Image (cartoon, coloured by chain):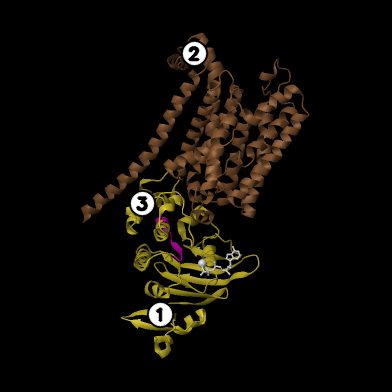
Chain colours: A yellow, B brown
């Protein structure tokens, strides 16, 4: 179990995170939801030591990741940023960078095998020798996720990993992440705005509001009332063959004026 | 299906191997070009030693006369060009990575000018240069290379600190950083000129070459100092090549990959300014080599610092050697100042990069 304890963080002027505590089970995907500017990206960066927390701990395998060496932390936590820079590295080399925490002098055979496997899993073979700055936004996003997977972390932090992907790739990406999480017992924290994707592939749902956790729990906590309280928007939650889906502004369908 | 998978994997492995092989062959070709250029440079000149004689002499089978020309005159110059070129190419490459600025180079950031100022102070104010040499032309025999190096480093470090401060705390754009470099260059060049103004003729002759650079003044002690510092720096840089690769995806991502961004930045810049200062202390300001070399090699090996670093070093050496040989032969027996030639090569490249748009470089 991975425990987040009492994380607090603020930028110079204002407090962004207050007293954030929650647990994660290995193999689970945790969706982090909330309005723009709620502090989702900030939370992820705190778990990852990019933002220095003012208080709190991240316990993975009984050690506080916020206190160990950066290189050791990088073996436990991988991170995919919301915005990524495309540089003049080939896809292969970019994914190989995920092995960086393990590499002493040069990449070993094992590192290269892992990279090949991840490249195959994400279907990047066709452009593995192309430069990142010649890829489309979605292709780049997949490469960055591949790099994070190559890190073989215990905790994977994804900040809107599907924002640039087409619908097919969104579903493929998330089902792959879910599958890898279960198979390798990785806890995955996914910041995501697409609630339907979250409902489909995530096991736990964390709502952030006013610098605190508004609610945290399994799919049963995803009620229309909660979602409305966070997003200030009327929604309905329906079930379609056992899968929950969210429908925004359901009353518009019913009112005759919307049919025009 | 399984066999298919295996075959597929083999195909993948092979493409990667081909691609690594390509990069290695780039390095090999560069090394070969460098060797050829070096032999040619030793051979080229007024005394008319053939290439064959040069080779024989280098392997210890030459006559006394060819020996004295090769080992006494030509070789020090060529070796200086080789080592200084490698050092400058390497420094430019690392600075461009650390500062995330494709326009960065020891000369564009004012580090070289700071170092030249420091060296001038050492020679004129601290008397580290020889005073009593017979002719002004040969007056630049630095009598205390260590003080000169130290002062040059202090001068270079001042520029480096200011640039680092701007990049870390003000997050200035690459172009603004270069503007700061221009200001620093002007400041230090002005200081150098002022000091020269109050110095006597011999001393002025001794410091004037810093403005243009000169590869022909180094003795073996000085070459050894440059070589040792550069070699140590090279080892350090190569140990950090994965870090520089990680820098390519931005500071935050680099940190999440386990790179101690602050340590790598500060140590890297300190070493860069040390190497650049040592080079400047003994051969003067040679502009743009560190800018040109990495940009040429990026076309072939991309931003993969595993290969870009050695390739930049080799290219820097080839460039400097070629420029110097050209400078010696073009209007012989007059030797054109090396700094002027590299500027002629580098300034258009610099403008080209600006036209192309710095961010996309
Ligand atoms: N570097 C910074 N300095 C000051 N304030 C910041 C900084 N970065 C973010 N903030 C502020 O912190 C708050 C939380 O930002 P954060 O990026 O975590 O939001 P988010 O939940 O990820 O939003 P989004 O859904 O738009 O990505 C915002 O109000 C933002 O303006
Ligand atoms: Mg965000």
Query: Pointers 2 and 1 in contact (CB under 8 A)?
Result: no
Q: Residues within 10 Å of mark 1 (few under 14, many from 20)?
A: many
Position of residue A176 measured from the top left corner of the image (x, y, whole percent): 35, 64
Spatial separation of the CA atoms under disc 1 and disc 3: 37 Å
Residue indicated by mark 2 = B48
Position of residue A182 measured from the top left corner of the image (x, y, whole percent): 36, 66
Secondary structure type for disc 3: loop
Residue indicated by mark 3 = A128
In the image, which residues are magenta? A147-160
Q: The N terminus of chain B lies in which quarter of the figure? A: bottom left
Query: Pointers 3 and 2 in contact (CB under 8 A)?
Result: no
Residue B208: quadrant of the picture: top right
Secondary structure type for disc 1: strand
Give me the chain letter of mark 2: B
Give me the chain letter of mark 3: A
Secondary structure type for disc 2: loop
Mark 2 or 1, closer to the camera: 2
Residue indicated by mark 1 = A246
């Amino acid at each position: 179990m991975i425990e987040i304890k009492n994380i607090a963080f603020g930028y110079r002027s204002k407090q962004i995170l207050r007293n954030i505590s929650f647990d994660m089970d290995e193999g689970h995907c945790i969706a982090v939801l909330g309005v723009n500017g709620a502090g989702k990206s900030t939370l992820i960066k705190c778990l990852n030591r990019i933002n220095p927390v003012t208080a709190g701990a991240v316990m993975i395998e009984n050690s506080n990741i916020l206190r160990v060496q950066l290189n050791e932390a990088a073996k436990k936590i991988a991170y995919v940023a919301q915005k990524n820079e495309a540089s003049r590295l080939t896809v292969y080399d970019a994914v190989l960078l995920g092995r960086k925490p393990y590499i002493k002098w040069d990449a070993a055979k094992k590192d290269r095998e892992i990279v090949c496997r991840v490249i195959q899993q994400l279907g990047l073979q066709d452009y593995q020798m192309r430069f990142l700055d010649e890829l489309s936004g979605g292709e780049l996003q997949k490469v960055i996720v591949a790099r994070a997977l190559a890190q073989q972390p215990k905790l994977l932090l994804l900040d809107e990993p599907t924002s640039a992907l087409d619908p097919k790739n969104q579903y493929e990406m998330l089902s792959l992440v879910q599958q890898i999480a279960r198979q390798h017992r990785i806890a995955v924290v996914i910041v995501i705005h697409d609630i339907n994707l979250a409902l489909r592939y995530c096991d736990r749902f964390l709502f952030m509001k006013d610098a605190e956790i508004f609610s945290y729990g399994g799919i049963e906590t995803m009620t229309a009332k909660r979602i409305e309280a966070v997003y200030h928007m009327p929604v309905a939650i329906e079930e379609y063959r056992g899968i929950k889906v969210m429908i925004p502004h359901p009353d518009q369908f019913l009112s005759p004026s919307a049919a025009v | 299906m399984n066999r298919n998978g295996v075959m597929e994997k083999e195909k993948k492995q092979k493409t990667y191997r081909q691609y690594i092989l390509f990069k290695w062959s780039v390095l090999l070709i560069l090394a070969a070009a460098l060797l050829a250029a070096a032999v040619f440079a030793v051979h080229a000149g007024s005394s008319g030693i053939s290439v064959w004689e040069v080779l024989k002499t280098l392997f210890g089978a030459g006559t006394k006369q060819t020996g004295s020309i090769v080992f006494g005159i030509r070789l020090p110059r060529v070796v200086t060009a080789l080592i200084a070129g490698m050092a400058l190419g390497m420094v430019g490459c690392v600075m461009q990575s650390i500062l995330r600025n494709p326009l960065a180079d020891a000369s564009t950031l004012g580090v070289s000018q700071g170092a030249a100022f420091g060296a001038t102070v050492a020679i004129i104010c601290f008397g580290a240069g020889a005073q009593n040499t017979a002719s002004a032309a040969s007056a630049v025999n630095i009598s205390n290379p260590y003080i000169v190096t130290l002062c040059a480093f202090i001068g270079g470090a001042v520029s480096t600190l200011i640039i680092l401060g701007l990049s870390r705390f003000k997050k200035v754009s690459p172009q603004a950083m270069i503007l700061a470099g221009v200001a620093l260059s002007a400041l230090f060049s002005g200081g150098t000129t002022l000091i020269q103004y109050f110095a006597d003729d011999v001393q002025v002759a001794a410091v004037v070459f810093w403005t243009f650079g000169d590869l022909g003044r180094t003795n073996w002690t000085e070459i050894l100092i440059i070589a040792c510092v550069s070699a140590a720096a090279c080892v350090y840089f190569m140990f950090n090549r994965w870090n520089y690769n990680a820098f390519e995806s931005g500071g935050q991502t680099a940190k999440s990959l386990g790179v101690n961004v602050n340590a790598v930045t500060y140590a890297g810049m300190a070493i860069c300014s040390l190497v650049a200062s040592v080079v400047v202390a003994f051969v003067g300001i040679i502009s743009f080599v560190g800018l040109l070399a990495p940009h040429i090699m990026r076309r072939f090996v991309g931003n993969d610092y595993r290969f870009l670093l050695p390739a930049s070093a080799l290219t820097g050496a080839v460039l400097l050697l070629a420029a110097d040989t050209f400078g010696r032969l073009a209007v012989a027996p007059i030797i054109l100042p090396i700094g002027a030639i590299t500027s002629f090569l580098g300034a258009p490249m610099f403008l080209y990069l600006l036209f192309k748009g710095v961010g996309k470089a």
